[in-house]
Amino acid sequence: MEELDGLRESLLEGRIDRRTFVQKAVALGISLPAASILVSAWGRGGTGIAQAAVGATPKRGGVLKFARNFEPVTLGPFGAADNGTIWTIMMIYDQLVEYQPGSLDPQPGLAKSWQFKDGGKTIVFKLRNAKFSNGSPVTSADVKFSLDRFKDPKVNNLLPFLADAIASIEAPSPDTIVMKMKRVDGAILSNLSVFPASITPKAVVTKMGDKAFALDPVGSGPFVVEKWARGQYLKMKRNPNYWRAGKPYLDGIEFDYITNDNTRILKLQSGEVDVAESIPFSQVQALEKGNLRVEVAPLASIDGIWLNNTHKPFDDKLVRQALNYATDKNAINKVVYFNRAQVANALYPFFKYTDKSVQNYPYDIKKAKALLAKSSAPKGFDVTILIPSEDQTKAQMMTVVKQLWAEIGVNVKIQSMETNALFTKYMNGDYEASDPLPSITSDVLVPDELALAWFDPKGVQKGFWSFYKSNKAWALTRAANGTTNEAKRKQLFGQLQRLTLADAPWIPMFFVPARTGISSKVQNFRTLESGWWNLWEVWKS
Amino acid sequence: MTAYLARRGLHAVLVLLIVTLAAFLLIHMVPGDPVRITLGAHAPEESVQRVRHQLGLDASLPHQFATFVAGLPQGDLGTSINLQQPVSQIIGPRIWPSILLLIYGTIISLIVALPLGIYSALYRNRAPDHTIRVVATVGLAMPSFWFGLLLVELFSLRLGVLPVSGYGTGFFGHLKSLTLPAITVGIYLAPLIIRTLRSSLIETLSADFITSARARGFGERRVIGKHALRNALIATITILAINIGYLISGTVVIENVFGIPGLGSLLVSSIQMRDFPTISALTLVFGLLVILVNLLADLSYAVVDPRIRL
């Protein structure tokens, strides 16, 4: 079967995605189940994932030109929490532990090993031999300095609660860090992988001050900032002192900031850039020809419709469940996402402990009607759904929702508003239903961060402003977060997933993937589930 | 002349203050908190309050506006909320791409519009005139971003002679990168000039002094070039100057489509981030630009028409 071999190669090299592979394999006379088995054997998770040709040796050199949608606000670890900033920072700094392609667990970063003691109340990290880009060694004093700042809510404005369980950080010898915990935190390693936990050189930060440092940063990550022309580009070059021997392969990266979707695509097509992010779903297929391909990679991101549980009739669980049943996710996926999104089976993004056997509400009009008939709004009702005006995808999605809900007597009005005006309104609880942000993502690949923020009845986010309250959900969250026992965490988070989905505080719909257009010259490119990329392993042929 | 300039200067300061105040009030009326936007949904409320205090955003609006205005004489445009850098440092490097684009676009529109406008007037109500008017109307109605994308499709993707977007490096790099955006600006502006020039030229051509010039036996070239065109140009310059504001708003879209690091794209991102000081400062700069261009237009009347004394 020569054709099949050809298909296999195309799949491995990412020239075709898994769906195209199955279609073509079926056309070759292979049964659908057999084609699906082949795809899981040959293709890896997600579609169109980058794969270097088997046996090819990475080539050193070259500058990767990368058209980005979002420009950083700052290059310091504590200034801003947008994806423009975070994903760039990850190329400049290292953390003690880091996410790597193909794993939902943090891997050794600046810490080469660690050990949990006293049942998780003490963690001892051994640091590796690493240097900052200015040549000075990364010592335990730098780590202590950086993590003390991570822990200080006056410095770490952004995510201080991720360091809440840490009592103290000690540096008994230059390559040892001893972390004492106030309480056991099952997510502590994941929390130490986030961007405000980046390790920075104490001497440089103290001397320069945060503002100046944020413009001319020094880290131990794979790349060093060369020139930042705001509104235009950020040039970075290889950190010659990077601790992963022989890496990065690239001489440098140039991020070009282009907010217009069409322009980014044209840049890629004309060969002026090698990679372009945020390809609209409608254009993915059209781009996948010639020397271009589109990587559709799973991301810790969720999309859906949030319901204000304090607003009638959404205070009634039957109504919320009815709407969940009335929402045909597969139809929306087909029309809006061209079948490239994954139907969510949890209230929050796809994570390490997500129980794959759990199913989202299936599309069932009869059940939806029956539930609504029993509810406090048996005759249906009017609802206004707020969406960000810049987002075409959400507008399309809500048009389908409007048709679907009309079938059970729910009359939808779609109202679009400028993103930030909308989000202010949303946070004030001044809404009925909303898909409030262009994307809702997690900083870590374990559920702790979002579960703690969303299910804490005394927290600020109050069920991500759905005002959902459940003592059971909070108790499960606390119990799961309070242990380092993996089996127990998996079990408790599974329970949390089922319980909260059944309570239906909102309508979770999709885990939305990243879509990145890539030239065939670029090898070994991968988007991590956390959103950024393995650029230190990328090379150009 | 000096008295005239002094009067205009005073007038300008007043207008600028009013425009800046209006922009300041408008952006504060729109909901959205710049600090919350920067720090993200997960940031605790205490962080947001602390940063608001550090930036003086918890002060009353009149106080905030007064602080902004008080800094102006020293060239202090305030500090960007999101970028945490002085606004003057952020705006400085982004003025030139915008100004270069405006000038380049205007030159292209003049190159296209002057001959067409004259031709149209000379062949009034005949085939060439009708054709030019139809083309001009289509040009006026066409969305500029769409036309820009068509140009990119042709010159960048098919022919590969000009870059898709960006600003290039060095003066000639800038010119090369700005060619397609400038054509887009030019095509947007040209119909206006064609129509104004045509009608004012037609009007002038029926004036007595043209008839007498012809009667004195001057060649048609001299009659049109020296006598008619000079008079007709005044209306055209006025239209150009009045439309500078319109043109600036057009470059906001064009800068975004072509990824040009100018003031327009900065304005869009500042509004999205609710960066109040940057928005106020940009309003001031745009206002200044409009006033300066109008002043230049008024001064140029005197050059074009020696009868006018300022």
Image: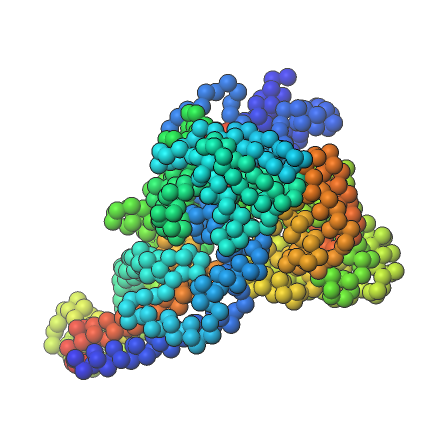
Write down the quadrant of residue A139 in the picture: top left
Residue A216: percent from left, percent from top: 36, 46
Total marks drawn?
0
Residue B275: percent from left, percent from top: 44, 62
For this rendering, which residue is in front, A273 or B188?
A273
Q: Quadrant of the C terminus of chain B?
A: bottom left
Q: Residue at 46% across / 36% down in the picture? A: A140
- Report whether A431 appears left or right of A286: right
- Report whether A19 appears left or right of A363: left
Can residue A39 be seen?
yes
Q: Residue at 63% across / 62% down in the picture? A: A426
Residue B285: percent from left, percent from top: 33, 67
Write down the quadrant of residue A493 in the picture: top right
Q: Residue at 29% across / 77% down in the picture? A: B12
Q: Residue at 16% across / 75% down in the picture? A: B214
Residue A467: percent from left, percent from top: 71, 60
Q: Is residue B157 above or below residue B207?
A: above
Question: Outermost residue, front direction?
Answer: A172
Write down the quadrant of residue A346 in the picture: top right
Can residue B36 be seen?
no
Q: Quadrant of the N terminus of chain B?
A: bottom left
Tell me how the rendering is colored: rainbow
For this rendering, which residue is in front, A418 or A521?
A418
Q: Is residue A520 above or below residue B41?
A: above
- Report whether A76 appears left or right of A512: left
